[in-house]
Amino acid sequence: MKPAQAMFRRELWRDRWLTWRFESRRTLGMPGLLGIVLLLTAVLIVTTTPATDTEDIASTTRPAKRAGHASTDRSSAEPIALSTLPDLFPAFGQSADDIESIIGFARDSNLTLGSAEYQMGNAEPGAGFLHYQVLIPVKDQYASIRKFIALVLNSIPNAALREIHVERPAVNGEVLDARVRFELIYRRAGP
């Protein structure tokens, strides 16, 4: 094939491509062309995905779905789960160790500690839980206070952040005054 013929064929294909592109853009518009590209991509993905993998996944999830829908009577399952829930929490005797850990985390975070307040929360009668609140005033930069709170919440599973109040005493200062209130939850001793 001569170079002139090869160039003519390239020009012919280029001309056909430009004509098709112009006509399709004129009839379908840009959103229509994008829709066609998305449909072709979806068809390509579906045809190239091995069917055995999806069938294996579907077969493993079907028994779990059936087991979840087999018992529509939830009243028999909930009392068992609720009655064992208090056993997951530590006894109130561990409160001193938890408070010591909280104070230790504050010291590890290099916070300036104020005088802490401790208060037994109001528990509902008959509830299997006791609520113990610890209010700790601290002073330092925001990052240190945040690190302290994260250490407590990640290390003591029965601790919850109840409240945090932050004040900046000086407008241009970086040291913050914060009062952090944790609630420690314990199981009630005895029946």
Image (spheres, grey):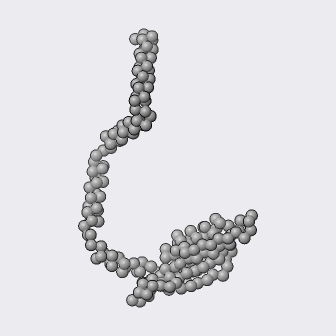
Task: Work out which quarter of the rendered image holds the N terminus and state it.
Answer: top left
**Is residue 105 something that shows in the picture?**
no
Residue closer to the observer: 160 or 99: 160
Residue closer to the observer: 33 or 8: 33
- Quarter-wise, where is residue 175 in the image? bottom right
Q: Residue at x 36, y 37 (%)?
A: 40
Q: Which residue is drawn at 40% across and 35% down?
A: 32
Above or below 190: residue 35: above
Q: Which residue is drawn at 65% across and 73% down?
A: 178
Residue 135: x %, y % from top left:
60, 79
**Is residue 115 something that shows in the picture?**
yes
Residue 78: x %, y % from top left:
33, 76
Above or below 165: residue 13: above
Residue 72: x %, y % from top left:
26, 69
Q: Which residue is drawn at 28% across and 76% down?
A: 76
- Quarter-wise, where is residue 100 in the image? bottom right
Residue 170: x %, y % from top left:
74, 68
- Residue at far front of view: 27
Task: Work out which quarter of the rendered image holds the C terminus and state it.
Answer: bottom left
Residue closer to the observer: 77 or 96: 77
- Quarter-wise, where is residue 151 in the image? bottom right
Horizontal side of 28 relative to 51 (left or right) equals: right
